[in-house]
Image (tube, grey):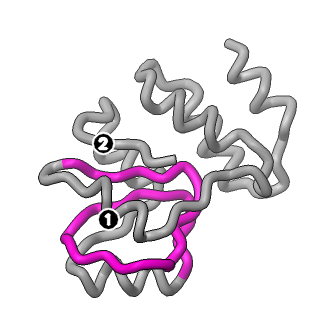
């Protein structure tokens, strides 16, 4: 319940983050609640992950989720599905060049509501 109060108190100016946080906080799955908690921080404190870090966490059947922005520093050599709130243009290009796919957190939540085979990278 504290998470919902925190989200209501913050009231971000961007409508996309407000609706996403509302949706995630209503989930009964602990993983999506954890994602909402990470996203409910101010924008300057949100997670930013480079491709070089994601390269270390790539698994066979796992989707990687970043509760923030994916940046294009480093290379990605493996085919992987990455979900994030935002992607830099260079990161998106490098992921697609490696044969991977990019998704928004909203799409990932819709496709996998039970959060099976997803790893959060922070």
Residue occupying the point 28% across, 87% down: 97
Give the answer, above or below, for where 54 lies relative to 42.
below
Mark toward the start of the polypeptide (1 vs 2): 1
Label 1: which residue? 55
Q: Who is closer to the viewer here, 75 or 20?
A: 75
Label 2: which residue? 118
Question: Which picture quadrant has residue 115?
Answer: top left
Q: Nearer the viewer, mark 1 or mark 2?
A: 1
Give the answer, above or below, for where 28 lies relative to 79.
above
Magenta range: 62-88
- In this view, the residue farthest toward the top is 1
Q: Which element carries disc 1, helix, strand or loop? A: helix
- In this view, the residue farthest toward the left is 60
Q: Which element carries disc 2, helix, strand or loop? A: strand
Residue occupying the point 43% across, 29% down: 31
Q: Is residue 37 left or right of residue 93?
A: right
């Amino acid at each position: 319940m504290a998470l919902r109060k925190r989200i209501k108190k913050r009231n971000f100016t961007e409508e996309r983050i407000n609706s996403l946080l509302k949706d995630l906080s209503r989930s009964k799955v602990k993983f999506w609640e954890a994602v909402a908690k990470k996203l409910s921080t101010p924008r300057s404190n949100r997670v930013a992950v480079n491709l070089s870090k994601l390269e270390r966490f790539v698994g066979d059947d796992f989707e990687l989720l970043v509760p923030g922005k994916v940046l294009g520093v480093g290379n990605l050599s493996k085919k992987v599905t990455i979900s994030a709130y935002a992607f830099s243009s260079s990161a998106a290009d490098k992921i697609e060049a490696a044969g991977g796919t990019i998704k928004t957190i909203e799409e990932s939540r819709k496709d996998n509501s039970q959060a099976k085979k997803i790893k959060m990278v922070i």
